[in-house]
Amino acid sequence: MDTKSLATLLFDASLPTLEEISNTYPRRNLKEGEKVTRMAPSPTGFMHLGNLYAALTSERLAHLSGGTFYLRIEDTDQKREVEGGVQAIIDGLSHFGLNFDEGALVEGEKGIYGPYRQRQRAKIYQAFAKDLVEKGMAYPCFCSEDELSDLRARQEAEKEDNLGYRGKWAKCRSLSLEEVEERLAKKMPWVLRFKSEGSIDNKFKFTDLVKGDLELSENDMDVVILKSDGIPTYHFAHVVDDYLMGTTHVVRGDEWIATLPIHLQLYRAVGLKAPKYMHIAPLMKMDGSTKRKLSKRKDPELALAFYKQEGYVVNCVMVYLMTLLNSNFEEWYAQNPDKSYRDFPFSPKKMSVSGALFDLVKLDDVSKNELAKLSNTELYALLETYTKEFDKEFYHIITAQKDKVLEILNIGRVGPKPRKDIAKLSEIKDYISYFFPELYQPDYQFPENISEEDRNLLITEYKDIYDENDTQDEWFQKIKDLSEKHGFTSNMKEYKKNPEAFKGNVAQVSTVLRVQICGRQNTPDTYEVFRVMGNELVKARLSL
Ligand code: GLU
């Protein structure tokens, strides 16, 4: 077969030569150890936790090495593309503090290795494809859908266990130049297939930076590398791009391990050096007693938008993802509580091989810890931004009474052991609602052992003795005295020994007052809470 003539028949004469291409994309001048990574999503409009997890891995690898993290839009499958898809990717990640040094922007792009949108690179892939045709390593296939199903049926009938377009079954492999010419003249659609010389009986070793040493079988399928519209498949496009764009480390989901032999084979065929690969396992969750992948349909927490809407603070999510990414992060962070997760010496070697377990309860714990480290003003600023977008009513309340909100947020926040009870910004409204008459919805659950009569007595008398200028000791002494006066002991030890001897104890009396004033059983320190509420409100709530 005259492959040069075949290539001329199939491709436009105006395609750039490989030499021209390689001059346009100079090799990056990297320092020892410097890494170039990318995120290469399809613009489907849906950004999920797995995207963020992989992006964080890539971003950390690049930036910890002083390298480059770039964005390439893999829009070769137009069916999956949605309007605004690129914006969703960029906004989604930048919300989490991940920014690209290079690549596609919402409008246009930055960097010299573009275009960073694959559809705009069609001529580049075609130039590489043409070279493969010239070398006798790729050929046009005119098989229709019907012919392909027929092929499958025949393979099944012959009990082939490796179904597909390959070897002796690949009928377009043997078309002559004239036959190709004839079909092209009839305007029959064609795809370009790679002519595989591999055999699945041949095994080879491959070292993945996360999975370790793998034993893989060679690929023997004649995979499609250009579709009938001249646009490449993922297999071919990413091989060409990762080489030309100088990617040193490809971080991607482990569903790609199955086709890794194709990718390595394509690298060899085009004569380019493959990057290093890191295949990461998907995030898992416990569903009852089984571990399964997070699912778009069942788990709202898979969508990145969920975290923003719920008011999870970015740093909390990132710190939690780091705990999932590297098993030794938690210990490091406990020892370095003032450092950022970005200071952590992240290592792919410490990544989970089989899929880290994602757990919202754990995220809440991490978040509570993180939010406890913030000052009231820091937390207020986050709350203001959040409510402005997601809760206008509350936004107006807090901005109109900012000083008061700051005081409220400071309760239990200062001192060596700050309270850890807020996991996300959306919880704050309920958490502090009893300070605001316009939000107050009391749930009066009083201690059951105290009669209504005693309760009313305690409340009414407390109204007369409460003084907002009391010190904490004076304040508590008053509650103790009030308790004793009505047969409730302030001696907890005595009470434990002989509960029958008393109507109840001082803690229960405090609960009565708390519930009457705050409309709930759980609040931070009541002395502080009453003080911040102010005399007027406290007394008003004590009026029966
Ligand atoms: N476009 C591919 C995807 O969205 C990218 C995989 C890769 O990072 O190479 O899954």
Image (cartoon, helix red, strand yellow):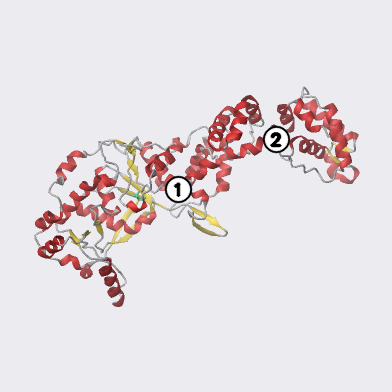
Label 2: how many Cα within 10 Å (few below 14, some 14–19, many 20+) = some
Nearest-to-viewer mark from 1 and 2:
2
Quick one: 342 or 84, which is closer to the camera? Answer: 84
Q: Is residue 360 above or below residue 418?
A: below
In the drawing, does residue 131 fall left or right of residue 436? Answer: left
Label 1: how many Cα within 10 Å (few below 14, some 14–19, many 20+) = some
Quick one: 492 or 363, which is closer to the camera? Answer: 363
Q: Is residue 173 above or below residue 30?
A: below
Q: Which residue is mark 1?
A: 48
- The structure residue drawn at horizontal position 31% and vertical position 55%, both measured from the top left corner, is 206
Q: On the rendered image, what quadrant is the C terminus found in?
A: top right
Q: Please tell me whether mark 2 sits on a helix, a strand or a loop.
A: helix
Q: Please tell me whether mark 1 sits on a helix, a strand or a loop.
A: loop
Residue with the most extreme top position: 469
In the drawing, does residue 516 fall left or right of residue 262? Answer: right
Q: On the rendered image, what quadrant is the N terminus found in?
A: bottom left
How many marks overall?
2
Q: Which residue is mark 2?
A: 434
Mark 1–mark 2 distance (CA, rounded to whole Å): 36 Å
Three-letter amino acid code of the residue under disc 1:
His
Task: Give the image location of residue 102, x and y in percent.
Answer: 32, 36
- The structure residue drawn at horizontal position 81% and vertical position 32%, both measured from the top left corner, is 542
Task: Give the image location of residue 113, x and y in percent.
Answer: 26, 39
Quick one: 173 or 412, which is closer to the camera? Answer: 173
Q: Earlier in the sequence, mark 1 or mark 2?
A: 1
Q: Quadrant of residue 201?
A: bottom left
Three-letter amino acid code of the residue under disc 2:
Tyr
In the drawing, does residue 483 fall left or right of residue 199? Answer: right
Task: Give the image location of residue 270, x and y in percent.
Answer: 20, 52
Task: Give the image location of residue 217, x and y in percent.
Answer: 30, 62
Quick one: 286 or 513, which is closer to the camera? Answer: 513
Q: Quadrant of residue 196?
A: bottom left
